[in-house]
């Protein structure tokens, strides 16, 4: 079966974020089924999914309750839209539940089909908000280098991924990027507190450069996910809040990864004590069982949009799709009844921090960090304590070795990242850390055969 599927895959399927040619030569791994925190491939391997799919399968695989919620809703009402003054029970109930879980000043939600669409909606709302406030010149959005906000044109433009910008231009105009609070790569050896404040000061400098009257919003992930599980220094967010308040700039916190328990609170904003005006959500909202996203809208923006009257010419065929909404609702209900978020904060998050932190003793590891159930390892060359030459592809090598050993761990450059299902047990965390260490050992072994340090510095 594997070979014929691989051949058909090669013949017809263009994969996301993929070098089509290279994949055609190697062939893809076929994932056939999954349960709990494990995925299975067509060769009979069982692999611990340290990435929860793509940061989304928060309740783990095989949850019958979610399957039942989907099939019941499909029978009842498989589709209807929320355009033209109509609604349906799953969308209403999900909206109510989300607003109950969100910070108190958030009482509205606009549904989308994905996180990228949510960020397109953000851009539309931010501009409409300032137009209605009588400040139509407030158009610029300040975002960050190496941020990920999705892959539509707006999402990619808001994001700060250089390779995406290089292929995708011309970008949406009116978006400016500032430095990211990535201490390991850009501030190592310096006081993290001072470094965090400096990164916040870069936002203020950009606002001043553009002119406060021209800046609409600042957008950021609480912890950068796709950029490399980058946890900002503790001084960063308080300083950012001060800057935005001083200049009357809207705060957009992209909760697509950090929302729904990843950081041990319902939203990353709650961990960092933020009061965002807009919060794009997706991924963990449905534990990835069906595609659904949205934007949680704070009172300041919602009240303005509502009171002004006049149609908001924006929305998607699948905004608030009833089956997706029913599954998301059941997902949130299960998270509440099973105390998933509290468990991440008080038990399994701290346990992962302890076990993952032990990997610091590995010669290849320059830093092991985690918060809640997101974590990263920074790979360094033990010979010099610096990064390996980029051309060695140490991160990708470690990722492939890890996969073969039975653990999905992703690489971003030479940063290894994990974001396991929130329901992972302590025993499974032990297994994850053991497999990660095994992958590091094998990676070190393989890299030791590379021609060494002298040529590198040449
Ligand atoms: C994945 C992601 C998105 C995009 O979501 P899609 O559902 O893939 O469109 C946006 N923002 C962040 C922070 C993400 O991680």
Image (cartoon, rainbow, N blue to C red):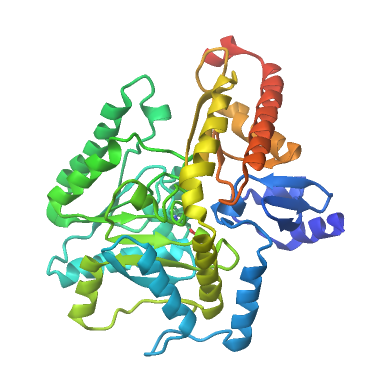
The answer to whether residue 170 of the structure is visible from this angle is no
Depth check, front residue: 287 or 384: 287
Count of numbered badges drawn on the protein = 0
Instruction: Residue 147 in the image: state x and y as whole percent.
Output: 41, 46
- Hey, which residue is sitting farthest top in the picture? 454
Q: Is residue 426 above or below residue 190?
A: below
Q: Which quadrant does the N terminus fall into? A: bottom right
Instruction: Residue 400 in the image: state x and y as whole percent.
Output: 69, 37
Relative to 292, is 423 on the left or the right?
right
Q: Is residue 244 above or below residue 78?
A: above
Depth check, front residue: 457 or 45: 45
* The quadrant where residue 129 appears: bottom left
Relative to 416, is 408 on the left or the right?
right
Depth check, front residue: 183 or 336: 336
| Residue drawn at point x = 79 percent, y = 61 percent | 8
The answer to whether residue 51 of the structure is visible from this angle is yes
Instruction: Residue 318 in the image: state x and y as whole percent.
Output: 49, 77
Relative to 141, is 288 on the left or the right?
right
| Residue drawn at point x = 45 percent, y = 48 percent | 264
Instruction: Residue 98 in the image: state x and y as whole percent.
Output: 40, 67
| Residue drawn at point x = 57 percent, y = 31 percent | 355
* The quadrant where residue 215 appears: bottom left
Relative to 108, is 335 on the left or the right?
right
């Amino acid at each position: 079966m594997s070979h014929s599927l691989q051949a058909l895959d090669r013949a017809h399927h263009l994969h996301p974020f993929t070098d089509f040619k290279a994949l055609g030569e190697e062939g893809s791994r076929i994932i056939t089924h999954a349960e709990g925190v494990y995925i299975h491939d067509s060769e009979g391997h069982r692999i611990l999914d340290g990435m929860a799919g793509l940061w989304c399968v928060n309740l783990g695989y095989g949850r019958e309750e979610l399957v039942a919620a989907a099939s019941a809703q499909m029978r009842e009402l498989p589709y209807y839209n929320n355009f033209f003054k109509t609604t349906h029970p799953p969308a209403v109930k999900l909206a109510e539940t989300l607003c109950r879980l969100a910070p108190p000043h958030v009482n509205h939600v606009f549904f989308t089909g994905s996180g990228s669409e949510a960020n397109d909606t953000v851009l539309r709302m931010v501009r409409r908000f300032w137009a209605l406030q009588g400040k139509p010149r407030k158009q610029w959005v300040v975002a960050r280098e190496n941020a990920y906000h999705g892959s539509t044109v707006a999402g990619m433009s808001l994001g700060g991924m250089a390779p995406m910008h290089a292929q995708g231009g011309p970008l949406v105009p009116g978006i400016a990027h500032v430095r990211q609070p990535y201490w390991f790569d850009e501030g190592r050896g310096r006081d993290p507190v001072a470094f965090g404040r400096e990164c916040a000061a870069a936002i203020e400098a950009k606002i001043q450069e553009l002119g406060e009257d021209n800046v609409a919003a600042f957008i950021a992930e609480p912890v950068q996910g796709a950029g490399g599980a980058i946890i900002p220094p503790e001084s960063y967010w308080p300083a950012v809040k001060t800057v935005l308040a001083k200049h009357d700039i809207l705060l957009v916190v992209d909760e697509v990864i950090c929302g729904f328990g990843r950081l041990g609170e319902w939203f990353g904003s709650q961990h960092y004590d933020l009061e965002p005006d807009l919060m794009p959500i997706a991924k963990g909202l449905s534990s990835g069982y069906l595609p659904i996203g949205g934007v949680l809208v704070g009172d300041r923006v919602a009240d303005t949009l509502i009171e002004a009257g006049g149609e908001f010419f924006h929305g998607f065929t699948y905004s608030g799709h009833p089956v997706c909404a029913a599954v998301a609702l059941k997902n949130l209900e299960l998270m509440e009844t099973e105390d998933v978020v509290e468990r991440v904060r008080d038990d399994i998050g701290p346990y992962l921090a302890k076990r993952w932190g032990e990997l610091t003793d590995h010669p290849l590891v320059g830093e092991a960090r985690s918060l809640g159930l997101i974590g990263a390892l920074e790979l360094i060359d033990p010979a010099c304590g610096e990064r390996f030459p980029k051309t060695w592809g140490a991160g990708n090598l470690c990722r492939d070795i890890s996969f073969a050993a039975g653990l999905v761990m992703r690489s971003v450059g030479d940063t290894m990242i994990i974001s396991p299902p929130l329901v992972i047990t302590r025993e499974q965390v032990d297994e994850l850390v053991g497999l990660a260490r095994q992958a590091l050992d094998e990676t070190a072994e393989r890299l030791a055969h590379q021609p060494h340090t002298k040529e590198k510095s040449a």
